[in-house]
Image: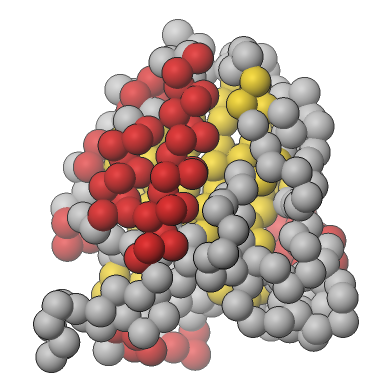
Amino acid sequence: ADYNLENFAPGDSRIPLIVNHIATYLGAPSIIFLQGVQDSSGPTDDGTVDANLTLSDLKQALKERTGIPYDFIDIDPVNNADSPGRGSNIRSAYIFNPLKVRLHNPNPGNSSVANSVLPGPSLRFNPGRIDVPPGFNPCPKPLVAHWEMIDHKGTFFTVNVQWTDKDALTTLQSDYRPPVNPWIRERNAQANVTGSFIAQILAQDKNAAVIAAGDFNEYAFVEPLKRFVQITGLQNLDVVSGIPEVERYTSTSGSFAYGSQDQLTHMFVSPSIARYVGKEDFEHVHVNTWAAMEDAASVYDPSLARLNVCKH
């Protein structure tokens, strides 16, 4: 599953609602790609960079609700280097069920050394961050991991992204012509770097199982994602599973889209996974876009996939 928790902090009042979404509407998935995770002091700019308290709160609440001993992984950023606002140190993370999956040959990286693809394919750091070109608007770095099934039936790679925000975006229906799509230069660069990393995995093993998901902050028909798909050869699960275009929205944001429904979060898979995806295997779960503002846990809906990553 994929879920942007939108500035999730320790002691967050939304924890019961988020846990209910994960346990009830997502069915307690084996892995959840998380975005919008703040450090252990939330928005306070005090030099804290770890998110152990933030993620432990969610982990404990999930255990109390589901009985599953979820665990988490993330990589701490350099202080105030990965998000526009100071103090929060936003990052991507994974929450996972250790009874189902675990890291394959774990070797965690850090924020000072970029990850790379080694022969196998394998990762230099597992988990590790994919670096992006310097000089761009700060954003969380993609978090890549190599997993194995507990039953030893297969391994797979995941790439968790949160590309640069679309602040000050105008809609297709606005008076601006052409519509304003800020920071697209940054997202094009992020598409190149993220896509090239994935392409290196698939160049070594065309049958590798790869899942890329998260907040790409872009529409599927715009240049950054078109470029990403061209570089990687990954397939959009919306298309593969046949979700109607009118049902592909995952957010409602009046702040930059005047209340329109958008799809800025996506999930892409390698051909070895896509060939086994059916019409019932992927869904955007509209627990937030259908809710009143005071009842929503995030401006983003989670997405849920049932994917076959086993060897064939």
Give me the residue at 82% from left, 71% from top: 40
Report if residue 182 is visible in the image.
yes
Q: Position of residue 81 (x, y in %)?
A: 70, 68
Task: Report whether 138 appears left or right of 123.
Answer: left
Task: Report whether 301 appears left or right of 230.
Answer: right
Q: Residue furthest front?
A: 135
Report if residue 4 is visible in the image.
no
Q: Position of residue 74 (x, y in %)?
A: 73, 51
Q: Position of residue 38 (x, y in %)?
A: 71, 71
Q: Position of residue 112 (x, y in %)?
A: 78, 50
Camera-side residue: 107 or 115? 115
- The colour mode here is secondary structure
Camera-side residue: 260 or 203? 203
Give me the residue at 69% from left, 42% from top: 114
Camera-side residue: 154 or 122? 122
Image: 246 above or below 158: below
Give me the residue at 66% from left, 62% from top: 91
What number of labels is visible? 0
In which quadrant will I find the C terminus? top left
Q: Quadrant of residue 258?
A: bottom left
Task: Report whether 69 appears left or right of 3.
Answer: right
Give me the residue at 77% from left, 63% from top: 78
Q: Quadrant of residue 37?
A: bottom right
Image: 165 above or below 175: above
Q: Quadrant of residue 287?
A: bottom left
Q: Residue furthest top?
A: 312
